[in-house]
Image (cartoon, rainbow, N blue to C red):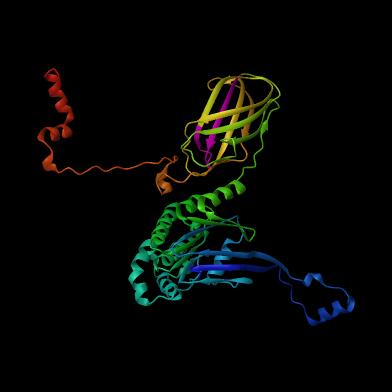
Amino acid sequence: MNTAVIHAEGLGKRYRVGERERYVALRDILARVDTAPFRLDRSSVPDHIWALRDVSFDVHQGEVIGLIGRNGSGKTTLLKLLSRITRPTTGFANIRGRVGSLLEVGTGFHPELTGRENIYLSGAVLGMKRSEINARFEEIVAFSEVERFLDTPLKHFSTGMQMRLAFAVAAHLEPEILLVDEVLAVGDIEFQKKCLGKMQEVSRSGRTIVFVSHQMNQIRRLCERVIWINSGEIWQSGPACEVIAAYEEASLRPNVASECRGQARFLRWSACGVNNVISDGLGEVTLHFHLQLPKPISQGHFGVSIMDRESAIMVGWGFDNLDLAPGTHELVLRMPILPLRPGIYSVMCSLFNDGNNLTGGESVERWHAVPPLLVNAPPRAHPRDRFAGVLNVPAELEIGQPVALGELSSESLALSVNPVGDFSKERAAGK
């Protein structure tokens, strides 16, 4: 027996593409037939596109599932099918439980009604009684931070205010299944963090979440399993770290050419001698760079920098006094540890002839390593990005046994309160 709260089988959605045909009178149709009775008017044949095709998966109670993929891959269409906003062309989806959805800003709200009235409207759509809505009304208003405008028609709300209210309603009215689209990107950073914290709280209560986002850090923090949708089909499904790593490697490669000056050229590179992926940065890490030299390098300088998406340098190295003969060389950079947070990083290489870190020299090559570096280690730092920093270092906390104040001697208490005074007494006594 299938115990999934969401069971999708062979889901497909086909849309008609093209402009509407202008109004055609009966005389126009007769004229067409009269002038070309045997010609097929192919302009009247509709063009179709499959937004989703043959999508099947299960989601069990309490799971937090992430949906990732490029724009137009079919993620939002899938959520609309699960929300019963649109009908599937093929297949079906069985939903067991009350569904709360946050898709597009304003979905499920009425623009002419006030914020207060829309809270009750959304609760009624979810099948909740008025008493249930009343019990959570204050929490919804406090979370959305729109109390001052609660009795204003929704059409006068800004996009951000509408999104705040919509998320507050969807998260606090306790649906068994919560569907959340990329709409969170509309809000400011602080509210995004607030929403993610609320979704973590919702997931711990045993409810199910299907979450769409282009922010891989959000997916890593929230989701245990990820489904990657590409061109309307499931491309890969599995543990979050594995699927996100494959997605980032496939879709986020920088298209930057080598700035070759004819004196050197980097051919390729790899991490740990295998690929561009580091699965764990707590052990030894090696970066291998293959360099082709048509001319010799004398007293050269080789620099390597690892940068995040904002081009901030996470770590960098410089090596001087290099003498390299013409030919192909493998430069191996060894590190005992590289504890970067999970994500994608760019690697920048530079090579100078007759120079060093201080005096510079003749620049013979600057190369943005392709593909980028992918760190696929499990998150070990603070669970919130805001406090996690740039390193991914594990830590353990030990708490000693409590000591009652009455058990502390007067000397030890004085030492802990005024250690300088005790030291001065010892020094005066010649100790």
Residue 283 percent coordinates (x, y): 47, 36
Q: Is residue 313 magenta?
A: yes
Residue 352 percent coordinates (x, y): 61, 24
Asked whether residue 158 appears in the rendered view, the answer is no
Asked whether residue 385 appears in the rendered view, the answer is yes
Query: 255 or 242, which lies in front?
Result: 242
Which residues are drawn in magenta? 299-315
Q: Would you place residue 59 above or below residue 275 in this image?
A: below
Residue at x 38%, y 63% (from the top left corner): 205
Residue 190 percent coordinates (x, y): 42, 53
Q: Would you place residue 184 above or below residue 152 in this image?
A: above
- Residue 330 occupies which quadrant of the picture? top right
Query: 158 or 291, which lies in front?
Result: 291
Main SS category, magenta section: strand
Residue at x 78%, y 80% (from the top left corner): 25
Q: How many marks?
A: 0
Q: Is residue 205 left or right of residue 163?
A: left
Residue at x 61%, y 68% (from the top left corner): 11
Q: Is residue 309 magenta?
A: yes
Placement of the C terminus among the 4 image quadrants: top left
Residue at x 42%, y 59% (from the top left corner): 199
